[in-house]
Image: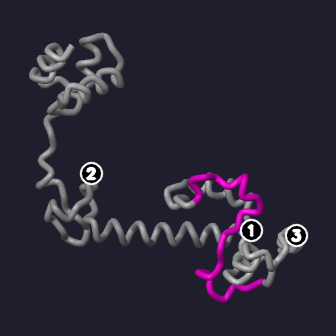
Amino acid sequence: MKPLLAKLVAEGLSIRQIAQRTSTSYTNTRYWLRQHGLKTNCRAGRKPRDLSRLRKCACGETNPNKFYGNKYWLCAKCWNAYSVRKNREKAAWAREQLGGKCRICGFDKYKSALAIHHLDPKEKDVAFRSMRSWSLNRIAKELTKCVLLCSNCHVALHAGELPLRSVRRIKT
C-alpha cells in the first residue's frame, strides 16, 4: 500500500485524485497517507499558493509572520479586534433577547454586570461557554432555557440565598 501511495504522491496527485485512482474514499485515502507519513504537494491538482504575495491586511500589514494560519486578509492584531467586537455584539444581542435587565430586581445600569442563568442546569448545552462561535439561531434556541440576572442576584441564587421559584414567578 505504501509504495503505491508514494508513487501517486510523487506524480503530484491530490488526495481526491489518488482516491479515484485507487477506487477508495477520500477519507480512507487521507487516513492511509497520514499513517504512512505522506503528504501531497497540491490541492486538487493546483499549484500551491505563494502566500508572501497574497497576505495584505487592511491596516497595511504584509509580514507573513503576523498572520494566522489560512487568514490571508487579516493580520493577527486586526483579527483579534474583529473577534472581540463580534463577540461583544453577540453578547449584547443575547442580553437584549432576554429583556436587557435583571429578571428579579430590574437592574440594567451596567450591561456587563448581567449574567445569563440557565433555569435547569440539566438542559444546558455542554458547549455553552463557547457560544461565541455559535450562530444566532443556535444562541436563540439556548436562550429559551435561560433568564438574565444581575451579578448580585445570580450569586445569591447560586448560594441558595434566593429561591429559584422567585426567578420563575417574576414576569418581565
Q: Which residue is mark 1?
A: 147
Nearer to us: label 3 or label 2: 3
Q: Which residue is mark 2?
A: 70
The residues bearing labels 3 and 2 have C-alpha atoms spaced at a distance of 49 Å
What element does badge 1 sit on?
A: strand
Residue 101 visible? The answer is: no
Check if residue 166 falls in the magenta segment.
Answer: no
Q: Which residue is mark 3?
A: 165
Q: Quadrant of the C terminus?
A: bottom right
**Mark 2 or mark 1: which comes first in sequence?**
2
Residue 28 visible? The answer is: yes
Is there a contact, CB below 8 Å, between mark 2 and mark 1?
no
What element does badge 3 sit on?
A: helix
Q: Quadrant of residue 38?
A: top left
Residue type at tag 1: Val
Residue type at tag 2: Asn
21 vs 142, left or right, is: left
Residue type at tag 3: Arg
- Residue range corresponding to the magenta coloring: 106-128
Q: Is residue 166 above or below residue 8?
A: below
> Residue 162: x, y in percent?
82, 78
> Residue 164: x, y in percent?
83, 70
Residue shown at the point (70%, 84%) measured from the top left = 152
55 vs 26, left or right, is: left
